[in-house]
Amino acid sequence: MRVLIADADPAFAAAARAALRSDALVVEVVADAAAALERAAETPYAAVVLDLALPGGRGVELLARLRRRRVTSPILALTADGKPAARIAALRFGADDCLVRPVLLAELVARVHALARRAGRPSGDVLEVEDLVLHCAKRRGFRGGRAIPLTDREFAALEQLVRAHGQPVSSADLLATLWHGKSAPRDNFIAVLMMRVRKKEAIFSKWKCFKLREKSYFFCFFMLFLVILLI
């Protein structure tokens, strides 16, 4: 599951990120309201941990702005105001849960999991490899939290490679998936398709994710970064 932490305190954000990552969650961190709005609107996170004191956020108004932008991810609001009225306001303006600082990290992790379960986020529908995320039902791909514009066939090819978990996928298998048994396209169809995906993906990362050889494709890991090899 992918979680967004939007918090202006770098020490707390780092500690929360480490706690969530140790519980097998993929975590992104932003430190201001503008970045929180942008990321949350682009990516359907399993949960958003939101500091109500973010620069430019204007308290609970940030919650209202997120909901106005059709952000449906569950939101765990963090507030330094211990009065019941502050928690009630956060819930009324769009938070699904609220914690008062200082926050116990174990409780934060537990509440994030509870929010994701309550929202029914389907784990099998979302494929993640490092910072590459594929939302299969919506046919949308993200790299580092940013959307990658993929056609249906480009998405299908990428999905098949990710689901292979590092095992080689032949060009024939890719053609069968993409062409559904119909007449085969030109001989270099797969190579051209993968080069298009590489070009689109490269916009969002300085790391080259495709290397061209011939005949089959597979995922592998090198220096903790995702690499797609065509051999």
Image (tube, helix red, strand yellow):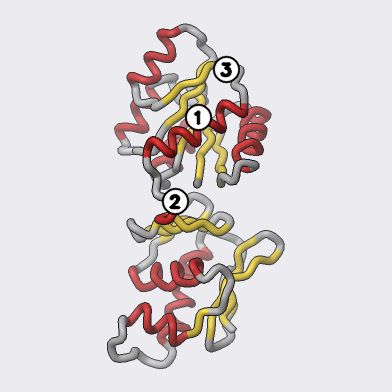
Residue 124 occupies quadrant:
bottom left
Residue furthest right in the image: 223
Residue nearest the observer in this picture, 157 or 11? 157
Check the image and report above or below for 33 versus 222. Answer: above
Verify CB contact (< 8 Å) between mark 3 and mark 1: no
Residue nearest the observer in this picture, 157 or 197? 157
Residue 70 occupies quadrant:
top left
Q: Secondary structure at mark 2?
A: helix
Q: Which residue is mark 2?
A: 123
**Quarter of the rendering occupied by the C terminus:** bottom right
What residue do we see at 51% from left, 25% from top? 51
Badge 2 amino acid: Ser
Report x, y in % for residue 208: 60, 68
Mark 3 or 2: the one toward you: 2
Check the image and report above or below for 53 versus 13. Answer: above
In the image, which disc is placed on residue 101? 3
Mark 3 vs mark 2, CA separation in Å: 30 Å
What residue do we see at 47% from left, 77% from top? 194
Q: Secondary structure at mark 1?
A: helix
Mark 1 vs mark 2, CA separation in Å: 17 Å
Q: Earlier in the sequence, mark 1 or mark 2?
A: 1
What residue do we see at 60% from left, 64% from top? 226
